[in-house]
Image: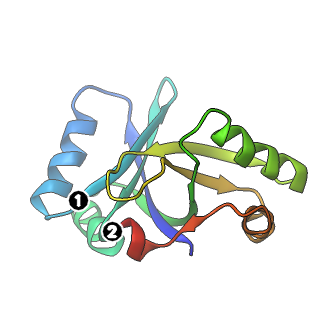
């Protein structure tokens, strides 16, 4: 149930994000989730797309540095405390959350969060044991 995420390394300057999204759009790539983390000199753009391999090829053809990594997508109950339940489960497992961000979607009944864990198998097992639903690529796309 791991999902491939595209991480794109960009100089922190005007127009770079617009350029990347145009390249992906021109290649027919659908962006489902997007997150930007930046520093003074560069940023890391993380995206979930419908075709990671094709997206990576399109970006690399334009000399944009990127890589595919595995992440977990978790269904979070859309109630007060829904995210807290997920985070408490991860905390109890002793696994660190390296980063997380939300997915915008209307297809599934609950909100979705993307997670990168320090120990993915351990985190996933803890979530499954707690009855938390993990989403696979077929459900997502």
Identify residue for label 2: 141
Q: Distance of mark 1 from mark 2, alpha carbons?
A: 9 Å
97 left or right, relative to 42: right
Q: Which residue is located at x 20 percent, y 37 percent? A: 18
Q: How is the image coloured?
A: rainbow
Q: Are marks 1 and 2 in contact (CB under 8 Å)?
A: yes
Which mark is first along the chain, 2 or 1? 1
Residue 122 position, x and y percent, is: 81, 67
- Quarter assignment of residue 66: bottom left
- Quarter assignment of residue 93: bottom right
Q: Is residue 107 above or below residue 103?
A: below
Q: Nearer the viewer, residue 21 or 109?
A: 109
Q: Which residue is located at x 26 percent, y 37 percent? A: 16
Residue 46 position, x and y percent, is: 44, 49
30 left or right, relative to 32: left
117 left or right, relative to 137: right
Picture quarter with the N terminus: bottom right
Picture quarter with the C terminus: bottom left
Residue 32 position, x and y percent, is: 32, 54
Q: Which residue is located at x 59 percent, y 44 percent? A: 100
32 left or right, relative to 69: left
Residue 30 marker: 1
Residue 115 marker: none
Secondary element at image label 2: loop
Secondary element at image label 1: loop
Badge 1 crowding class, 10 Å Cα cut-off, few under 14, some 14 to 19, many 20 or more, is some
């Amino acid at each position: 149930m791991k999902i491939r995420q595209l991480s794109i390394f960009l100089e922190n300057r005007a127009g770079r994000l617009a350029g990347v999204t145009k390249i992906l759009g021109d290649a027919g790539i659908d962006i489902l989730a997007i997150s930007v983390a930046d520093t003074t000199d560069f940023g890391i753009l993380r995206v979930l797309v419908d075709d990671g391999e094709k997206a990576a090829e399109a970006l690399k053809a334009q000399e944009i540095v990127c890589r595919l990594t595995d992440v977990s997508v978790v269904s979070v109950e859309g109630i007060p405390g829904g995210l807290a339940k997920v985070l408490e489960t991860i905390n109890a497992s002793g696994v660190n959350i390296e980063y997380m961000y939300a997915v915008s979607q209307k297809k599934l009944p609950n909100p979705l969060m993307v997670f990168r864990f320090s120990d993915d198998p351990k985190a996933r097992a803890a979530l499954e044991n707690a009855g938390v639903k993990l989403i696979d690529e077929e459900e997502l796309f």
